């Protein structure tokens, strides 16, 4: 698994945005989920089950992106541990 990670660029220094997302995984998920939720609400129209669909879609987006940002935090910890990145 680590060989594949290295081939895909997992041992490169994180970008500025990746550093921020790793430090703030909840906010990173909300910054994307909130506009998407508003878009789903606008597109849903007057259907009776649309509020439920919008809420579930927004929460699912927030959860997936928040977990992705949390995994970035773990990647950054691993880079520090291996001595590839000093955390700055």
Image: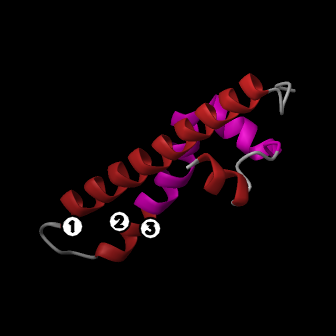
Horizontal relation, residue 64 to residue 79: left or right: left
Q: In this view, does 17 lie to the left or right of 88?
A: left
Disc 3 marks which residue? 39
**Residue at the spot x=36%, y=76% of the render?**
43
Q: In the image, residue 11 lies at what x, y percent? A: 76, 45
Marks 2,3: beta carbons within 8 A: yes
Check disc 2 and report the residue beneath it: 41
1 and 2 marks in contact (CB < 8 Å): yes
* Camera-side residue of 83 and 37: 83
At x 57%, y 48%, the residue is 31
- Looking at the rendered structure, the secondary structure element under dot 3 is helix
**Residue 28, quarter of picture:** top right
Write down the quadrant of residue 79 in the picture: top right
- Looking at the picture, the colour scheme in use is secondary structure
**Label 2, residues with CA under 10 Å away: few <14, some 14-19, many ≥20:** some
Horizontal and vertical percent for residue 58? 37, 54
Helix, strand or loop at label 1? It is helix
Residue at coordinates 67% horizontally, 27% vertically from top-left?
77
Q: Residue 50 — which label?
A: 1
The spot of residue 88 in percent (x, y) is 87, 27
Dominant SS type (magenta) = helix
Q: What element carries label 2?
A: helix
Separation of residues labelled 1 and 2 (CA atoms)? 7 Å
> In the figure, is residue 65 to the left or right of 7?
left
Question: Which region is colored magenta?
Answer: 13-37
Q: Tag 2 or tag 1, which sits nearer the N-term?
A: 2
């Amino acid at each position: 698994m680590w060989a594949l990670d290295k081939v895909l660029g997992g041992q490169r220094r994180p970008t500025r945005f990746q550093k921020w997302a790793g430090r703030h995984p909840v906010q990173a998920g909300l910054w994307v989920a909130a506009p998407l939720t508003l878009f789903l609400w606008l597109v849903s129209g007057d259907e009776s089950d649309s509020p439920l669909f919008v809420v579930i879609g927004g929460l699912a987006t927030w959860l997936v992106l928040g977990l992705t940002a949390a995994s970035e935090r773990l990647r950054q910890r691993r880079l520090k541990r291996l001595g590839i990145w000093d955390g700055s």
